[in-house]
Amino acid sequence: MADPRAFISFDYDNNSGDKLYFAGQAKNSRTPFNIADWSSKYHLPQKEWEDLIKAKINKCDFLIVLVGKQTSTATGVVKEIEFASVQNIPIFGVYVGGANSSTSLPTGLARNRTIEWNWEKIADAIKQVMKEGKNK
């Protein structure tokens, strides 16, 4: 069976570096998942962006939200969480950039599903969301 595919949602304006670092570490970790780097590389009209991102999220097994200190105000992240929820794509968050359990979360992301950046905990979270499964 192929490794599960993750869509990474992040605050482009404030956590792009964290996303690159996370993706780089993921390649070298023993955590069995692939990151689908399907962020929109250019500005699109809103409807076109929404259709593109919905389709990309639907091709993934789960969504990981990289939660930085200002992610709760990132409208794109909130939309991506909403798209995943509507499509029954499991979601969990990982604190980045100095964020922690007192950091405000984006709408739709549960506190009890947001963890510290620790590859063992991330592997456990992936196992959990894979048990839940897509479209269950």
Image (cartoon, rainbow, N blue to C red):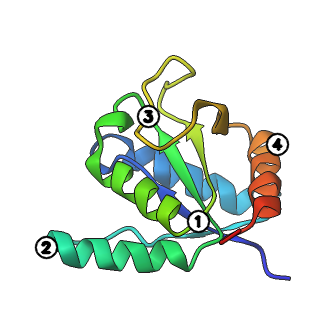
Query: What residue type is disc 2 on?
Result: Pro
The answer to which of marks 4 and 2 sits earlier in the sequence is 2
The residue tagged 4 is: 120
Asked which quadrant contains residue 52, the reply is bottom left
Mark 3 surroundings: few (<14), some (14-19) or many (≥20) residues within 10 A: many
Q: Which residue is drawn at 82% across and 47% down?
A: 124
Secondary element under disc 3, as helix, strand or loop, is loop
Secondary element under disc 1, as helix, strand or loop, is loop
The answer to which of marks 1 and 3 sits earlier in the sequence is 3
Instruction: State the mark number for residue 45.
Output: 2
The residue tagged 1 is: 88
Residue 129 in the image: x percent, y percent? 74, 56
Mark 3 and mark 4: span between their CA atoms? 20 Å
Closer mark to the observer between disc 4 and disc 2: 2
Judging depth in this view, the residue of 59 and 133 nearest the camera is: 133
Q: Which residue is drawn at 37% across and 51% down?
A: 77
Mark 1 and mark 3: span between their CA atoms? 24 Å
The residue tagged 3 is: 68
Q: Which residue is drawn at 48% across and 54% down?
A: 20
Mark 1 surroundings: few (<14), some (14-19) or many (≥20) residues within 10 A: some
**Can residue 13 be seen here?**
yes
Q: In this view, does 97 lie to the left or right of 71?
A: right
The answer to which of marks 4 and 1 sits earlier in the sequence is 1
Query: What residue type is disc 3 on?
Result: Gly
Query: What residue type is disc 1 on?
Result: Asn
Mark 4 surroundings: few (<14), some (14-19) or many (≥20) residues within 10 A: few
Q: Pointers 1 and 3 in contact (CB under 8 A)?
A: no
